[in-house]
Amino acid sequence: METQPLREPPLEPRSAGWTFDHPSHGTCVPECSSYGSCHCGCGATPKRSAVTSVPWNRYAGHPFTFVPGHQLRVVHPRAGMWSKQGVPVERVRPLIRWLRMQHGSVRAVAELLNMPESTLRGYLYNAKRKRVPPEAAQRIVSLTLAHRRRSRPLELWEEIPGQFEPAVMLLERRPSLALSQG
């Protein structure tokens, strides 16, 4: 009686960013330029496989393609937490804090950004998070910039043709000297 694997092997291709000639899962092949090192580019040395499993692209004695967890940096389609792409979270956190002060709560900001509150809290409080996906960072920046006050009519004219705020001129009132005739 032949036994079946407990789960199906991963499907290929996993990511458009994968540039190697072998599958992203399993072990590396000796012809690979990154043979013996993690394929995310960190330089770490992955463990070697103890067993051969052809459906899983594992061959005994060959190094794995990634150090555990590093495949998310390259392969995962929405790798926001560990991705090398994206915006550093240190650049986004001050904007989220400022938006929270303006709107009163993280929940209110999340509703305005049309994203889950838990995701926004993760950007704000998760110490492990390194980067924010570019689309989310762009929404946060856009909401922050929506609060800026336009000071020059030409700025509004360029952005919204036909609509602009009239320039407000502040005239300084100087107290007139009342000369008393005495």
Image: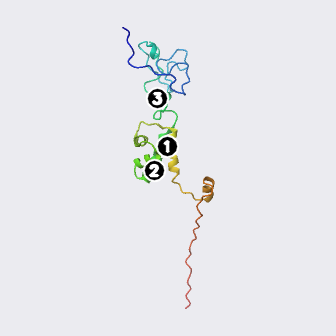
Check the image and report above or below for 27 versus 85: above
Amino acid type, label 1: Arg
Q: Residue at x 55, y 21 (%)?
A: 20
Q: Position of residue 39 (x, y in %)?
A: 51, 24
Seen as rendered, the residue at the extreme bottom is 182
Amino acid type, label 2: Leu
Q: Which residue is mark 1?
A: 91
Q: Residue at x 47, y 46 (%)?
A: 113
Q: Position of residue 16 (x, y in %)?
A: 54, 27
Q: Position of residue 55 (x, y in %)?
A: 45, 15
Q: Residue at x 52, y 43 (%)?
A: 138
Which colour style is shown? rainbow
Check the image and report above or below for 123 versus 33: below
Residue 72, numbered label: 3
Secondary structure of the residue carrying tag 3 is: helix
Other residues around mark 2 within 10 Å, as few (<14) / some (14–19) / many (≥20): many
- 1 or 114: nearer the viewer: 1
Secondary structure of the residue carrying tag 1 is: helix
Labels 1 and 3: the sequence-earlier one: 3
Instruction: Please give left or right for residue 113 compared with residue 1 in the image.
Output: right
Residue 74, numbered label: none
Check the image and report above or below for 177 versus 103: below
Q: Nearer the viewer, mark 1 or mark 2?
A: 2
Labels 1 and 2: the sequence-earlier one: 1
Q: Which residue is mark 2?
A: 99
Labels 3 and 2: the sequence-earlier one: 3
Amino acid type, label 3: Leu
Whether residue 58 is visible: no
Secondary structure of the residue carrying tag 2 is: helix
Q: Residue at x 49, y 39 (%)?
A: 88
Other residues around mark 3 within 10 Å, as few (<14) / some (14–19) / many (≥20): some
Spatial distance from mark 1 to mark 2, Cα to Cα? 14 Å
